[in-house]
Image: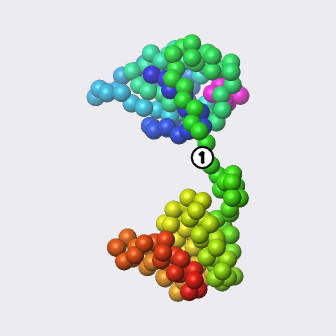
Amino acid sequence: MLKILVGGRGKGEELKWEAMSVEELATLASTPALFGGARTFRLVGALADEGRGEEFLDMVEVFTKSPHTFVFEEGKLLKGPTTKLEKAGAKIEVEKKLESASARPSGFDPYGLTFALGSRDRKKLWLGLTQSLKAGDKPEAIAGLLAWKARQMKDANLSRQLVWMYHDSHRGAGDLKLLLERFALTL
């Protein structure tokens, strides 16, 4: 079976295709597993490689007839290779890209929180925290980011307070969102 993931990440054992010959790949594709069952192999960026991309396209039928699953992870796929893969019966999946922090409509920068903590600006930290939560960031991620900044500042008290706050919230001592807001307002 041949599966092509464009813009995504698949599961399976990653093959170092750069160090493998065409014969080795063909043998791997045509040999069943020793104890039965199919294996899954991942090849990252193999089709986009200028030197060997054509070799892999020539082997498409070997991969589709294999008892194993071969997953090619590609950043993008041009029309020519896409047509050849579709004709051979490859399953092509295009993953939607996740929204990055810079692409958010609010233009919110989560690292602005670290600058506010570093300058000990209570108001900017609280405003940044509420904006981050509205943008959909997880409280655990925010607490981790702030704990990282506190360690970078070499402030053991702030770091300890943030770590305890995180663990206390998971023990049921309060909602982490509220604990972070309280932390920001009492800085």
Q: In the figure, is residue 119 to the left or right of 37?
A: right
Q: Position of residue 132 (x, y in %)?
A: 60, 65
Q: Considering depth in this image, is 37 or 24 the residue closer to the camera?
A: 37
Pick the front one: 161 or 14: 161
Q: Is residue 36 left or right of residue 94?
A: left
Which quarter of the rendered picture does the C terminus lie within?
A: bottom right
- 116 sits left or right of 38 in the view: right
Residue corresponding to mark 1: 98
Residue 143 image position (x, y, % from top left): 52, 71
| Quadrant in which residue 87 is drawn | top right
Residue 39 within the magenta-colored segment of the rendering: no
State the residue lying farthest toward the left: 35
Rendered image coloring scheme: rainbow
Question: Which residue does the image show at 34% across and 73% down from the upper left?
Answer: 171
The foreground one among 83 and 18 is: 83
Residue 23 placed where, x, y %? 53, 20
What is the x, y in percent for residue 3?
Answer: 50, 26
Q: Amino acid at mark 1?
A: Leu
Q: Is residue 168 above or below residue 186?
A: above
Q: Quadrant of residue 55?
A: top right
Q: At 69% from the left edge and 54% from the top edge, which residue is drawn? A: 105
Identify which residue, 64 or 125, lies in the foreground. Answer: 125
**Residue 33 in sight from this viewpoint:** yes
Q: Where does the N terminus fall, quadrant-wise?
A: top left
Query: Compared with residue 176, is residue 25 higher up or lower down, i.e. above or below?
Result: above
Q: Which segment did they paint magenta?
A: 47-54
SS class of the residue under badge 1? Answer: loop
User: Within 10 angstroms of label 1, few (less than 14), some, or many (20 or more) residues?
Assistant: few
Q: Residue at x 48, y 18 (%)?
A: 64
Question: How many numbered marks, from 0 up?
Answer: 1
Q: Residue at x 66, y 80 (%)?
A: 123
